[in-house]
Structure formats: structure tokens, C-alpha cells
Amino acid sequence: MLAAGEDDQGVMMSTTQEGIYCHTLVAVFCAAFRLGFDPYALALQAKMELLGDGESEDSSNLITWDADRVINESLLVARLRCR
């Protein structure tokens, strides 16, 4: 059984990892906008890779849904930043 501090630390690490992932996606999409690449194609490729990596439908469905949302939101943020 985990103590409260250990559980809180794990939650913070997860949030930090998600934040790093989001910032990385925004940076990649923003660079794509600036360099003349198609960031929408990059987002679509990332989504297709997520769908292809799913081993079991039940467990990967939630992960894919969350990742899809993160990709869409990161693409929107990059578009707004790089106008």
C-alpha cells in the first residue's frame, strides 16, 4: 500500500509528463507552421500511429481518445501562437 506522499508524487509526475508531451507537440506543430510543412498531416500521422499501436481495444481506447484530444489541442495552440 502506498503512502499519501508517494501517491501524490506519482500523480505530479504524470501531470509533468503530460505537460512535457503537450509542450513538445506544440513546438513540433509550431515549427511545422513556420517551416512550411503541413502540421495537419503530422497530426494525422500521429493519430494513425496511435490507432496502429493499440493491442487491446478496451485499454487502448481511452488512451487513444486522450491522446487524440491532446494532439488536437496542441495543434490549435500552435496555430494560434504561430500566426
Image (cartoon, rainbow, N blue to C red):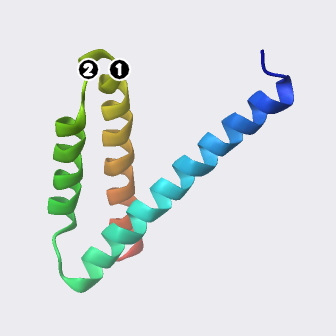
Position of the N terminus, as image quadrant, is top right
Judging from the image, what secondary structure is the residue with disc 2 in?
loop
Residue at the (61%, 43%) spot, across then down: 15
The residue at 41%/70% (across/down) is 27
Question: Alpha-carbon distance for marks 1 and 2?
Answer: 6 Å
Category of crowding for the residue at label 2, using alpha-carbon neighbours closer than 10 angstroms: few (below 14), some (14–19), many (at least 20): few
Vertical position of residue 46 compared to residue 61: above or below: below
**Left of 13 or right of it: where is 44?**
left
Q: Quadrant of residue 51?
A: top left
Q: Nearer the viewer, residue 63 or 82?
A: 63
Q: Please state which amino acid type lies under the numbered disc 2.
A: Ser
Residue 5: image location, x then y, percent: 85, 31
Q: Nearer the viewer, residue 76 or 18?
A: 18
Count of numbered labels shown in the rendering: 2
- What residue is at 38 percent from the left and 56 percent from the top? 74
| Residue where numbered disc 2 is placed | 56
Q: Cβ–Cβ below 8 Å for labels 1 and 2?
A: yes
Residue type indicated by callout 1: Ser
Q: Quadrant of residue 2?
A: top right
Check the image and report above or below for 37 versus 59. below
Q: Position of residue 26 (x, y in %)?
A: 41, 64
Q: Eyeballing the image, is 66 above or below 33?
A: above
Q: SS at mark 1? A: helix
For disc 1, the marked residue is 59
Left or right? Give the position of 35 relative to 9: left
Q: Is residue 27 above or below residue 57?
A: below
Q: Position of residue 70 (x, y in %)?
A: 39, 46
